[in-house]
Each structure stands twice: as C-alpha cells, then as structure tokens.
Image (cartoon, rainbow, N blue to C red):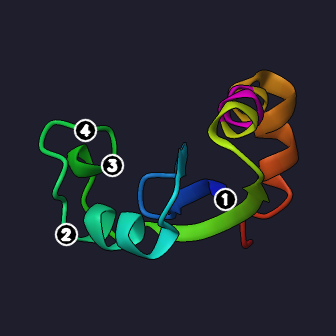
Amino acid sequence: MFVVYALYNPKHKKLYIGQTRDIDLRLKQHEGKIFQNSFTSRFDGDWILLYKEEQPNRSNALIREKQLKSYRGREFLKNYIPR
C-alpha cells in the first residue's frame, strides 16, 4: 500500500505533493528537514498534512501524484486549505 499526500506550509502558502510507503516516517522526515536542499526544507514554518489517499501500488501512486500536481489537482487540493 502506498500513500499519496499533500503538505501545506501556511507561513509561506506553499503546497508539496508526494507519495510514500510509510506516511508516518515520511512526515517525521519532512518535519526534521532530513532531506537537505529539498523543497520542504527550503521553507521555515510548519508543514501540515493537508490531504492523503491510499493507492494499492507504487504505479498507481505515481499516476495519482502526477494528477494532483496538475493545475486541476492543485485546484482540488486548495479546497482542503484551512482559511
């Protein structure tokens, strides 16, 4: 099982979309800025889990990640941003 997820940084109004097998570990890695020079480590402030959905395999997860990164996908995710 894979998880496609979206993180949001309210301080900078940035959205990050990714996929992983272990969502809990990945969130800790983002919070701890483990990925040096990555998109999420460039911005201070908290990243909150905005959205997640499970996919049966990595192939499907990559397809869904690509969909969410499209214009329509980002518009869909904007509905989850707290106001």
The amino acid type, in three-letter code, at marker 1 is Met
Q: Nearer the viewer, mark 1 or mark 4?
A: 1
**SS for dot 2:** loop
The amino acid type, in three-letter code, at marker 4 is Ser
CA gap between label 2 and label 4 equals 12 Å
Q: Quadrant of residue 71?
A: top right
Secondary structure mostly seen in magenta is helix
Q: Nearer the viewer, mark 2 or mark 1?
A: 1
Q: Which of 72 and 59 lies nearest the eye of the viewer?
A: 59
Image-based side of 5 in relation to 38, left or right: right
> Are dots 4 and 3 in contact, CB under 8 Å?
yes
Q: Which residue is mark 2?
A: 32
Could you tell me which residue is drawn at 75 percent across and 60 percent down? 54
Q: What crowding class fits label 2: few (fewer than 14 Cα within 10 Å), some (14-19), or many (20 or more)?
A: few
CA gap between label 1 and label 4 equals 24 Å
Mark drawn on residue 1: 1
CA gap between label 1 and label 3 equals 24 Å
> Are dots 1 and 4 in contact, CB under 8 Å?
no
Of mark 1 and mark 3, the one earlier in the sequence is 1
Q: Which of 9 and 3 lies nearest the eye of the viewer?
A: 3
Of mark 3 and mark 2, the one earlier in the sequence is 2
Mark drawn on residue 40: 3
Of mark 1 and mark 4, the one earlier in the sequence is 1
Could you tell me which residue is drawn at 40 percent across and 69 percent down? 27
> Are dots 2 and 1 in contact, CB under 8 Å?
no
The magenta segment? 62-66
What quarter of the picture does the N terminus occupy?
Answer: bottom right
Q: Which residue is mark 4?
A: 38
Of mark 2 and mark 1, the one earlier in the sequence is 1
What quarter of the picture does the C terminus occupy?
Answer: bottom right
16 inside magenta stretch: no
